[in-house]
Image: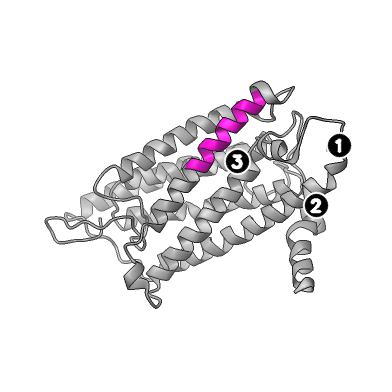
Amino acid sequence: MASAAAAASFWLAEHPAIVGFRWSPTHLWFSTWAFLLGFLASYVALCLALDAFLGAALRRRRPLPLGPVPAAHALLMAAVSAAIFAGTLLSAAAEIRDTRWSWRGRSRTTPFRWLLCFPPGTRSSGRVFFWSYAYYLSRYLHAARGVFAVLRRRRGASARVFAHAASVAMAFLWLEFSQSFQVLAILASTLAHAVAFGFRFWVGAGLPAARAARGAPVALACQLALLGCNLACHVGVVWMHFGAVGGGCSGIGAWVFNTLLNGALLWVFLHCYGKRGVCDDDGGATAARVTGSSGNKEL
């Protein structure tokens, strides 16, 4: 057990590639503004065009069969999210351990304050930013859920496409501007995704007892918990930047834009869950099931 823990710690927090990571637009995949903007424009345009084409070609709102693809994607997302969560947690602990000496009587910074508010001048390098980059890359994989929503003719598919695009943009900003509070945001997000996507795979694959759990509000509970965590983190950053920490927090300009995007994502959440339908991409684990005039129970 001890050897397994040591091996996990090495591969997730102490590997030279992780310790020596540095965010660079010239040496990393998908790390330039040109690529980001090009992807976002292409992704949104493709999804909206596909949605319009399916709406014109299919008179009735019938979903296209995707077979096991959504369930397989959910399993992959659950595994990736769990790995990023473990790596970020171990890396944050290692960073706190390695810099503890600088917090003893020489600075007002504490580990808790560091998690919420990076000191000004922080560069996107080291362990936690390696996993921030891994999280950023995972947003492209996550964006496939928007395509699934369009293909399966989900209500509010365009809102979900926007939400996925905004998620990619926010993760890029975290790295580009060394934005504060991203460690806690990544931990909360990946934990919620690991649980929600694991449940979606369980239901989508038809594993034992999946039928009984099919209507469980797991996805809704994870999204509510994530929204609550993000709100608490944003309040903490405001408190740290304007009062508790001299000099302010790193990446506060990007944080303001991040806050606006989070507000838009909150609108998407309320837009989807405030109606009869729910914000579930694959229909596997929904917060509610309603019966329409056509008898279809999955909206």
- Residue 42 rendering spot, x and y as whole percentages: 46, 44
Crowding at dot 3, Cα within 10 Å, few <14 / some 14-19 / many 20+, comes out as many
Q: What amino acid is at disc 2? A: Val
Q: Secondary structure at mark 2?
A: helix
> Which stretch is magenta?
228-241
Picture disc at residue 172: 3
Q: What amino acid is at disc 1? A: Arg
Apparent side of residue 279 relative to residue 246 in the rendered image (left or right)? left
Q: Are marks 2 and 1 in contact (CB under 8 Å)?
A: no
Q: Which residue is mark 1?
A: 104
Which badge, 1 or 3, is on the more N-terminal residue? 1
Which badge, 2 or 1, is on the more N-terminal residue? 2
Apparent side of residue 47 relative to residue 194 in the rendered image (left or right)? left
Magenta: main secondary structure equals helix
Q: Is residue 32 visible?
A: no
Q: Is residue 13 visible?
A: yes
Which badge, 3 or 2, is on the more N-terminal residue? 2
Picture disc at residue 77: none
Q: Which residue is mark 2?
A: 19
Q: Are marks 1 and 3 in contact (CB under 8 Å)?
A: no
Question: Relative to 152, does residue 207 appear above or below in the rendering?
Answer: below
Q: Secondary structure at mark 1?
A: loop
Distance CA(mark 1)–CA(mark 3) = 33 Å
Magenta run includes residue 231: yes
- Residue 49 rendering spot, x and y as whole percentages: 34, 46
Q: What amino acid is at disc 3? A: Phe
Q: Nearer the viewer, residue 30 or 272?
A: 272
| Foreground tag (1 vs 3) | 1
Crowding at dot 2, Cα within 10 Å, few <14 / some 14-19 / many 20+, comes out as some
- Residue 288 rendering spot, x and y as whole percentages: 29, 55
| Foreground tag (2 vs 1) | 1
